[in-house]
Amino acid sequence: MRSFPLTAALALCLLVAPACRAPARTEPARQAPTPTPNELPQRSEASPESLRLALAAVSHLHRPMGKPLPGDWLTTSPERGQTFEEYLRIDPVRPSGARRVLYVQPLGEFTPAQRRIVALASDFMSGFFNLPVKLAPEKPLPDIPATARRVHPQWGDAQILAGYLTMSVLLPQLPEDAAALIAFTSSDLYPGPELNYVFGQASFSHRVGVWSLYRLGDADAGEQSFKLMLLRTLKIAAHETGHMFSIRHCTKYECLMSGTNSLSETDRRPLDVCPECMAKICWATNTSPRERYERLARFCADNGLEDERRFFEAEAAAVEKNLKPS
Ligand SMILES: [Zn+2]
Ligand SMILES: [Zn+2]
């Protein structure tokens, strides 16, 4: 029998790591950063100078990364992180004037609650990255060849090879104006023969990714279960999309961009990024930090995420206070 030596818990971000670690300089999106007529000039609030001030203004609200618990990401994948200043120096992939749309493609069958979660994740990503999001109509899963599917030999779960979906299904459909094309599926995914499963996988150079809802909980099992699954989906979707814009794993703070090895580690992370990663996002997407925090606070208010709403509002207030002349 084929052996599956790694625990299931190891699958969360490990499996996107080869793409996370791909040298950003080889990515085609960065080779031709030709400005287009609809490219907006960098707003003053999104200039490196302003963002350094905003970063400092909210830093007291964030918890520095503590000592990792046994099994946490940093115990298995020591990384040095990436500051805002380092990010500016690597010439990161940014949504360009011609490629500014995040496409979300639901693939396969969904329950009504899962469908709501995909729609909410689309809204959240739009606010998180200040980009237009187009939620495409659901598509059935295509016929998957036998080489790209399996039944897990110990658990019996039907699984689809994640890389097949990204490279053979999504990539041929990548729209010209896409900053990224992200598929959500309710099917279980695996990344290759040696690992048990994967929550998602992305190709950052090709701007395509797929995320599975299969192991994120049961959205139909009541309000608390829905909320837990929603939070997990929002965190994973924003984390992986952040990688698509050359944002590496964060080690400085407890941050949405910190690597995680398990759902329990994901559950401990906040719904927002830390000050350093906020500055990266706002610079890359030409966004005012205050407007971004206010948008995300509204999203949380609309969806019953009260703790998260309060946090985003505190961040917005801290930036606002910093802008006022003393
Ligand atoms: Zn990651
Ligand atoms: Zn961070």
Image (cartoon, grey):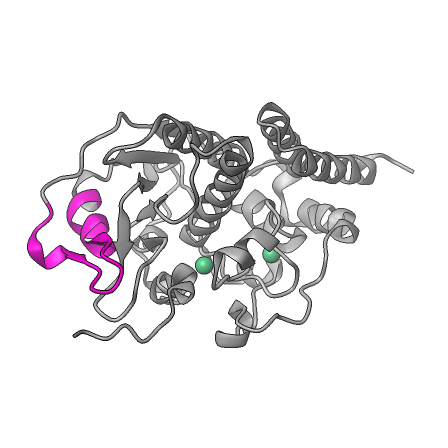
Q: x, y (%) of residue 316?
A: 72, 35
Please state which of residues 120 and 229 is positioned toward the viewer in this rendering. 229
Quarter of the rendering occupied by the C terminus = top right
Q: x, y (%) of residue 56?
A: 76, 52
Is 157 in the magenta? yes
Residue at screen point 33% across, 41% down: 182
Please state which of residues 75 and 224 is positioned toward the viewer in this rendering. 224
Residue at screen point 34% across, 46% down: 214
Please state which of residues 10 and 253 is positioned toward the viewer in this rendering. 10
View extreme (right): residue: 326
Quarter of the rendering occupied by the N terminus = bottom left
Residue 39 visible from this viewpoint? no
Q: x, y (%) of residue 159?
A: 22, 53
Q: Is residue 285 left or right of residue 52?
A: left
Determine the image quadrant of residue 117.
top left
Residue at screen point 56% across, 38% down: 42
Is 165 in the magenta? yes
Determine the image quadrant of residue 183.
top left
* Magenta-tinted stretch: 144-170
Q: Is residue 36 left or right of residue 61?
A: left
Q: Quadrant of ligand 1?
A: bottom left
Q: Is residue 256 left or right of residue 23?
A: right
Please state which of residues 93 and 107 is positioned toward the viewer in this rendering. 107
Residue at screen point 69% across, 67% down: 66
Q: Is residue 249 left or right of residue 135?
A: right
